Amino acid sequence: MPKILLNTVLLEKNRWEDGQIPSIQVSKWVHAIKEEGFDGIELWQNHALKATDYERAELKHSDLSIDVFNSYIKFEDGYEQEREKIVNLVHELKCKAVKFNLGHSMEHINMYISHVKDMLNQLPDSCQLLCECHPGTIMEDPETAYQFLDQIGSNRVKAIIHPFHNQVNIEEWFQHLGSSITHAHVSLYNNKLFHLLSREESFVRKRITKLHEHQFTGSYSIEFTAGVASRDENTNEVFSNASEDHALLRQLTSELGV
């Protein structure tokens, strides 16, 4: 059975607001997240970076693991102190992996590679770096993503894809990256809105089947769901929808023997 995580960015209504000041304390949600059967959390960086010392201590001693630290740090020159803060938090919270994004400029690829290697050396040996293959970055192209990972040359640097986005060609991603794909961000986005997975259950089932065909054995993280970024976003409603998505994903992966 694959691990299915709750990505705390989906609970955060201020995720895209100026300053990105957290509106919730994740520690107060841990019990509910665990009760719904999630295997751990992917922690949005500001839920730790802009939290109180007390909140960070609560997260550190939580009985729900922080499998992925969801960072938005930059890998351009001049962001050394910001990267150091993230590294320190990862050590403090004993996170198993760090999600990161690269910039959009191919001219800077050697700079990105250099800083990623530096950060890798600063993290615990057991901690992986997971690069999100995200539109608007150099990693949105599978061939470029392969070149990047190849030049990094470390089995501790892996890739994240978005298998339930229509425009994502799963065949192409696995053709280039294969077993380097170890994590999947889960969201269903159409017509400028996020939806429940059940809205397109047949499509979701087909995509999970494709992942299984390519021997994907990684983890999933419910990243966004219905109600996120709506005009009257309600955190309790969003969590309920994420839990519904989790249940369907658990069911389908179980049925398909993933």
Image (cartoon, grey):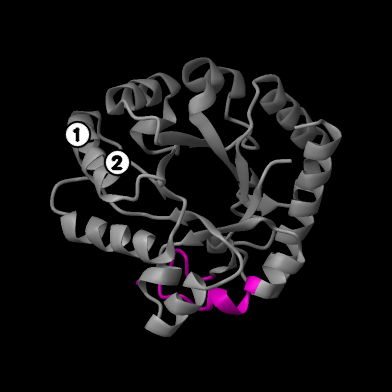
Tell me the element at label 2: loop
Asked whether 230 or 226 is in front, the reply is 226
Q: Is residue 24 left or right of residue 202?
A: left
Q: Which residues are magenta?
A: 13-30
Numbered circle sitting on residue 108: 1
The x and y percentages for residue 11 are: 59, 67
> Of marks 2 and 1, which one's residue comes earlier in the chain?
2
Report, in whole angstroms, how far the alpha carbon at label 2 lies from the one at label 1: 8 Å
The residue pinned by badge 2 equals 103
Asked whether 94 or 237 is in front, the reply is 94
Confirm whether residue 36 shows in the render.
yes
Identify the residue at horizontal 53%, vertical 24% (top origin).
179
Going by the picture, which residue comes out furthest to the right? Answer: 255
Going by the picture, which residue comes out furthest to the top? Answer: 175
How many labels sit on residues? Answer: 2
Looking at the rendered image, the quarter that the N terminus falls into is top right
Sort mark 1 into few (<14), some (14-19) or many (20+) by Cα contacts within 10 Å: some
Residue contact at pointers 2 and 1, CB within 8 angstroms: yes
The x and y percentages for residue 155 are: 40, 30
- Label 1 is placed on what type of residue? His
Looking at the rendered image, the quarter that the C terminus falls into is top right
Which of the 4 image quarters holds residue 121? top left
